[in-house]
Image (spheres, coloured by chain):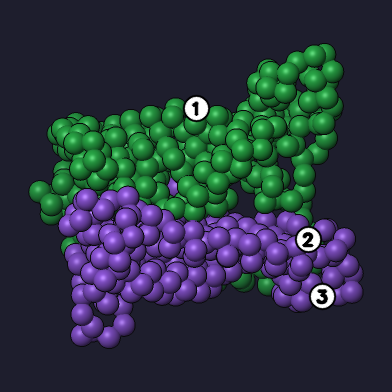
Chain colours: A purple, B green
């Protein structure tokens, strides 16, 4: 068992694969947060058209499998239609990485938007009413009064989205990005005798990645919770 | 739109009305422009030509590619739901058990399988069946998909059961124990039926997650909707239209389920009287999430 573990770690770049998982997570998380915030603001805005567009985005994206979105980005937009992200001459695996990140960001943005909206819903009406009463408009009351509290209220659901994102980075294995589950597939195919050890390594990796984040976000949401 | 979000802005005066009107026009124009660019790009890349879309008028496309694919997706989801419910209820009861070792073991199990990505579970199950148990044949991929989905969703359902029981009034349990039921039969006959009813909307939304996750079976060669769509696309050379059609199928099926869950939730809320409000911490109680009927945490 121990010997098998040592053999596997020497033969395969497990840390490199998890580093890829982390890179995917970080870049996609930033993208999802940006898109998601815009969508969330659209969904609470007074403009009907924007509200409808935001709702449509969330409904459409949330009901589509991530696998399909990632495929559409990599096989559809990149391979079939020939769009490129970033420098033209970057190699195929870099392109796949970028399209994978885009797919992850688009998908999780819908959930970020929902998390933020649920955060907005935790802000009592009195707060928005008070903001209006002292003469703040939609923009000012949103940015100065409601959103700061909404972000705090949204920490717990945002943490859930981040954990789901970490796990969902495995989906880009389907377009050949060399992250943890891609490596796992390769490892099992060559070393089927060590299948339990391989699964244990990979599962441990994800427990190590997700568990501290869950604890961190639970603590954060407790500490930053607005006392009412 | 809830009352809270509409309270963000006043009933608009003449100036604000004008501004809203201008913004509405600008917004509509921007969205229209975006759609137009999209359509023009697709047209420029020859994705809107009749030849690319004609296959969908041919019944054979549906009978030999898309419908069998959809059937595969639904079958995997069906088995996963049944098994997930059975194991999930068992695990949830285990987590509520008075016996500490059972509680601990079930807790570790649930936390572990919630942390491991579904795709990894599928890969592991698939290769374990293949190499470990020497299973082969047509159903191998199905077993892999169902096993992967079951473990994850059983853990999620166990948590739903636990939070459902947690949100029942304390008196229910006490009354059960007072009339001489054992802790187990209190749980089984009194708490569990109520908890499941309470959590039914969330359980139905979990079905959406399962349906979407079954698409991961692609990687272990399961004949689900995306794989059959890809086969179709490679024979007809219309990848983009096929993916769009598949997306529409998924959205229609999943959105219908979401609507059912939402309606059920509203009905339950109307009929739910006399229970104390569920705990306010949304981490503990998914029913407190503003849209409990919708999957608030993304899965694949």
Q: Residue furthest left?
A: B235
Front-most of residues B53 and A207: A207
Q: Is residue A99 above or below residue B152?
A: below
Q: Residues within 10 Å of mark 2 (few under 14, many from 20)?
A: many
Looking at the image, residue B103 sits to the left or right of residue B144; the answer is right
Which of labels 3 and 1 is toward the front? 1
- Residue at the spot 20% in from the left edge and 67% down from the top edge: A79
| First of labels 2, 3 by sequence position | 2
Q: CA distance from mark 2 to mark 3?
A: 16 Å
Which of labels 2 and 3 is toward the front? 2
Helix, strand or loop under label 3 = loop
The dot on residue A180 is none
- Residue at the spot 44% in from the left edge and 59% down from the top edge: A204
Residue marked by disc 2: A123
Q: Position of residue B4 (x, y in %)?
A: 76, 55
Residue marked by disc 3: A136
């Amino acid at each position: 068992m121990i010997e098998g573990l040592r053999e596997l770690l020497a033969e395969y770049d497990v840390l490199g694969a998890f580093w890829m998982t982390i890179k995917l997570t970080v870049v996609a998380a930033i993208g999802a947060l940006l898109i998601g915030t815009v969508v969330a603001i659209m969904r609470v805005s007074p403009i009907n058209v924007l509200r409808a567009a935001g709702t449509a985005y969330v409904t459409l994206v949330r009901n589509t499998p991530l696998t399909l979105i990632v495929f559409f980005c990599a096989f559809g937009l990149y391979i079939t239609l020939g769009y490129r992200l970033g420098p033209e001459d970057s190699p195929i695996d870099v392109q796949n990485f970028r399209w994978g990140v885009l797919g992850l960001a688009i998908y999780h943005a819908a959930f970020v938007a929902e998390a933020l909206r649920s955060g907005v819903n935790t802000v009592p009406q009195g707060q928005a009413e008070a903001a209006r009463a002292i003469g703040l408009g939609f923009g000012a009351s949103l940015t100065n009064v409601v959103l700061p509290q909404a972000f705090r209220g949204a920490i717990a659901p945002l943490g859930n989205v981040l954990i789901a994102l970490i796990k969902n980075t495995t989906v880009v294995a389907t377009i050949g990005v060399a992250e943890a589950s891609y490596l796992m597939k390769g490892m099992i195919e060559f070393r089927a005798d060590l299948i339990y050890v391989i699964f244990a390594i990979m599962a441990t990796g994800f427990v190590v990645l997700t568990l501290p984040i869950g604890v961190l976000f639970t603590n954060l949401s407790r500490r930053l919770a607005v006392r009412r | 739109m809830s009352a809270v979000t509409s309270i963000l802005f006043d009933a608009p005066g003449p100036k604000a009305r004008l501004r809203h009107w201008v913004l509405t026009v600008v917004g509509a124009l921007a969205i229209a422009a975006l759609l137009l660019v999209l359509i023009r790009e697709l047209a420029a890349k020859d994705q809107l030509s009749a030849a690319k879309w004609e296959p969908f008028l041919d019944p054979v496309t549906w009978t030999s590619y898309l419908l069998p694919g959809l059937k595969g997706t639904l079958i995997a989801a069906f088995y996963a739901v049944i098994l997930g419910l059975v194991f999930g209820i068992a695990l949830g009861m285990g987590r509520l058990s008075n016996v500490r070792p059972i509680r601990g073991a079930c807790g570790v199990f649930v936390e572990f399988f919630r942390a491991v990505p579904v795709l990894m579970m599928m890969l592991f199950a698939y290769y374990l069946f293949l190499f470990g148990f020497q299973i082969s044949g047509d159903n191998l991929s199905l077993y892999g998909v169902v096993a992967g989905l079951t473990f994850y969703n059983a853990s999620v359902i166990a948590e739903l059961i636990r939070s459902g029981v947690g949100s029942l009034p304390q008196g229910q349990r006490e009354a059960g124990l007072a009339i001489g039921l054992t802790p187990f039969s209190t749980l089984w006959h009194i708490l569990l039926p109520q908890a499941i009813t309470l959590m039914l909307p969330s359980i139905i939304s979990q079905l959406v997650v399962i349906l979407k996750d079954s698409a991961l079976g692609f990687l272990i060669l399961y004949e689900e909707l995306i794989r059959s769509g890809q086969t179709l696309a490679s024979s007809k050379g219309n990848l983009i239209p096929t993916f769009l059609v598949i997306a529409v199928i998924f959205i229609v099926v999943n959105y219908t389920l979401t609507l059912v869950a939402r309606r059920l939730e509203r009905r339950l809320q109307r009929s739910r009287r006399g229970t104390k409000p569920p705990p306010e911490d949304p981490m503990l109680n998914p029913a407190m999430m503003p849209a409990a009927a919708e999957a608030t945490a993304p899965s694949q």
